[in-house]
Image (tube, rainbow, N blue to C red):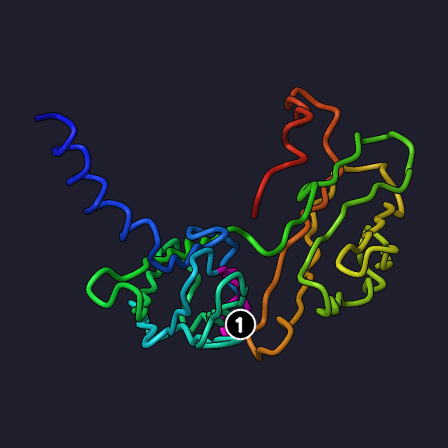
Amino acid sequence: MRVPFLIAILGITLPCLSRAELIWKTPILEIESPAQGAQKQIPFYFQNLGPETIRIDAVDSSCNCLRTDLSKRIIGPGESGTLTATVRTIGEPTNRTVRLEITTSDAPTRKHTLKLRLLATSLASLEPALLWWPQNGASRPLKSTLVIPEGAIPTIPPPPPESPFEWRLEQEENASRFLITVTPRSCSKPQESSLLIHWSQPGSDRLEKRVLFLRIQSDGPTTSPSPSSGRERP
């Protein structure tokens, strides 16, 4: 009795194994969310590993912030293609997940699901955000590194005559990295100041900024800043 039963099972499963099959290389992707007003293109790669031609009938998104384009809708056996998702950030970047539902001719009632996880990580950094010198110490130059989106150009005001500090801004070989060098005019007495750096995001009118804090630390009873103070955020 077991042999006919196995034959019956094989008769059911073999046709399923011969069906067309659309495979996605990476159905879940995680990227840094674009800056406000900016957009980013993310490719999802697929391939037809089955013996039959597949047609992509529909692509639905869970967010109107996302537009999709297909390199092809008809995929023959062994052929590959790309679904390109273009995501645009309208408001402030936030952590979120966008879902894509793809309807195909091989399984019209069983949709393919893709997920795009957007992470609102910082697109800029200033390290360290505090430069300090000991009172009566050497007026030596100290440096801070600014990293911003490629294509953005930062600006800083020139040091006024009454400022206890002088500074300059230089672009490094990496187009997104800038070096800010600050030198005290004198370390004879405690001083505090701040340096405002601002820039516009590429393709956006939004103004971004960072503040570099400058200090000549008193040699009195006040405890000097620890090394971690150089990583303080404004």
Q: Nearer the viewer, residue 83 or 64?
A: 83
Residue 225 coordinates in the image, percent (x, y): 66, 27
Residue 110 coordinates in the image, percent (x, y): 23, 60
Task: Work out whether 167 lies above or below 35.
Answer: above
49 left or right of 199? left
State the residue at coordinates (48%, 64%): 77
80 left or right of 187? left
Near mark 1 (Cα within 10 A), the count class, few <14, some 14-19 or many ≥20, is some
Which quadrant holds residue 93? bottom left
Residue 190 coordinates in the image, percent (x, y): 74, 38
Q: Nearer the viewer, residue 80 or 18?
A: 18
Magenta range is 35-47
Which quadrant is home to the N terminus?
top left
17 left or right of 2? right
Task: Work out whether 231 lies above or below 211.
Answer: above
Q: Which residue is mark 1?
A: 39
Q: Which amino acid, mark 1?
A: Gln
Residue 138 coordinates in the image, percent (x, y): 91, 33
